[in-house]
């Protein structure tokens, strides 16, 4: 079994664009945009959200992308549990419950923000 490594930490920030309002070019209109980046390298961003979506949808997407390292870590935990279950004759239904709980926790963590 390989040693557990702490997952990378990805963050997101709100970086809107501005453009002249099509109806009144004397004012600027804010276009929502989120950027996702590694905590230790904010200048090397990983992704940006789709500026054509509503701001709240973009933020949900940014949270999900930023949670990818923790989600992967949870999936690797599930894999390790499944590998161990064969060694100990674990109850497969109890293992499935545990896997579902871990997956649910990873998803809930990502959408809480």
Image: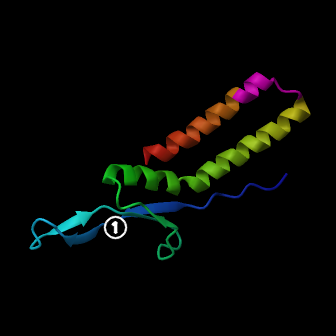
Residue positioned 30% across, 66% down in the render: 16
Q: Badge 1: few (under 14), some or many (20 or more) residues near its Cα, within 10 Å? A: few
The one nearer the camera, 58 or 4, is 58
Compared with 36, 101 (above or below) is above
Compared with 5, 89 (above or below) is above
Predominant SS of the magenta segment: helix
The image shows residue 64 at horizontal and vertical percentages of 50, 51
Compared with 78, 55 (above or below) is below
Residue positioned 53% across, 71% down in the render: 40
The image shows residue 71 at horizontal and vertical percentages of 61, 49
The image shows residue 8 at horizontal and vertical percentages of 60, 61
Q: How is the image coloured?
A: rainbow
- Inspect the magenta stretch and tell me whether residue 102 lies in it: no
Give the left or right position of residue 105, taking residue 4 as reference: left
The image shows residue 110 at horizontal and vertical percentages of 50, 47
Seen as rendered, the residue at the extreme bottom is: 43
- Inspect the magenta stretch and tell me whether residue 94 lies in it: yes
**Residue bearing mark 1:** 15
| Res 38 visible | no
| Res 32 visible | yes
Give the left or right position of residue 3, taking residue 103 as reference: right
Q: Label 1, secondary structure: give it.
A: loop
Q: Quadrant of residue 50?
A: bottom left
Compared with 59, 51 (above or below) is below
Residue positioned 75% across, 29% down in the render: 95
Residue positioned 65% across, 32% down in the render: 100
User: Total number of numbered labels?
Assistant: 1
Give the left or right position of residue 29, taking residue 9 as reference: left
The one nearer the camera, 28 or 113, is 28
- The magenta segment: 89-96
């Amino acid at each position: 079994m390989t040693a557990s490594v702490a997952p990378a930490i990805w963050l997101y920030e709100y970086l809107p664009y501005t453009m002249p309002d099509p109806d009144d070019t004397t004012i600027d209109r804010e276009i929502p945009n989120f950027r996702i980046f590694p905590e230790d390298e904010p200048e090397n961003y990983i992704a940006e959200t789709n500026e054509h979506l509503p701001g709240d949808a973009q933020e949900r997407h940014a949270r999900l992308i930023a949670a990818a390292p923790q989600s992967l870590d949870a999936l690797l935990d599930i894999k390790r549990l499944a590998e161990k279950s064969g060694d100990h004759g674990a109850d497969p239904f109890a293992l499935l419950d545990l896997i579902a709980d871990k997956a649910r926790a990873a998803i809930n963590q990502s959408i809480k923000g």
